[in-house]
């Protein structure tokens, strides 16, 4: 299993292939299309990420010593953003998720190319995923 930084570096490399932000947005949207979708039964208020302008549902499941994330969004860019976060954090150990330094966001220039509300949503998504990591770090699942 590649570690968080390996995956981030891969994303940074992928983004370096594009010259402008229209191409990068298209790539983000394409990533959203390959998102492992959340089961419809989890599309409830309990799984909505607070602080996002669009609706984003996020479910975390601990499988062995790893956490897997499933999500969906009603907005294509947001769906792409959450899919990138899932690509980086899903399948990792809870403590690695909780302590992850998600430097790829800065390196690909994502934050400055998002509207303030989307940027706040991005922060909320990261917080929620790290929160799940922290919560699952203390649980022992057989």
Image (cartoon, helix red, strand yellow):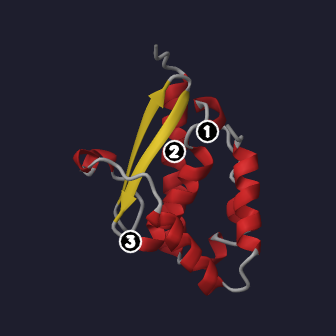
Crowd rating for badge 1 (residues with CA inside 10 Å; few <14, some 14–19, many 20+)? many
Residue 89 shown left or right of residue 48 in the figure: right
Residue occupied by mark 1? 97
Q: Residue at x 56, y 24 (%)?
A: 65
Residue occupied by mark 2? 129
Place residue 72 in its image quadrant. bottom left
Give coordinates of residue 126: x percent, y percent: 55, 51
Q: CA distance from mark 3 to mark 2?
A: 19 Å
Asked if labels 2 and 1 touch by Cβ distance under 8 angstroms, the answer is yes
For mark 2, give the secondary structure.
helix
Q: CA distance from mark 1 to mark 2?
A: 7 Å
Crowd rating for badge 2 (residues with CA inside 10 Å; few <14, some 14–19, many 20+)? many
Q: Is residue 76 visible?
A: yes
Which mark is first along the chain, 2 or 3? 3
Residue 114 shown left or right of residue 70 in the figure: right
62 versus 83 height, above or below = above
Q: Residue at x 50, y 72 (%)?
A: 29
Residue occupied by mark 3? 75
């Amino acid at each position: 299993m590649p570690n968080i930084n390996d995956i981030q570096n891969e994303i940074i490399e992928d983004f370096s292939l594009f010259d402008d932000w229209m191409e990068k947005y298209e790539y983000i949207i394409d990533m959203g299309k390959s998102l492992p979708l959340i089961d419809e039964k989890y599309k409830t208020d309990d799984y909505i990420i607070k602080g996002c302008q669009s609706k984003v549902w996020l479910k975390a499941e601990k499988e062995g010593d790893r956490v897997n994330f499933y999500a969906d969004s009603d907005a294509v860019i947001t769906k792409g953003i959450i899919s990138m976060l899932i690509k980086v954090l899903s399948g990792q150990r809870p403590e690695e998720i909780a302590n992850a330094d998600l430097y790829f966001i800065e390196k690909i220039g994502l934050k400055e190319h998002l509207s303030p509300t989307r940027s706040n949503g991005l922060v909320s998504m990261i917080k929620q995923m790290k929160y799940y990591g922290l919560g699952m770090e203390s649980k022992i699942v057989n």
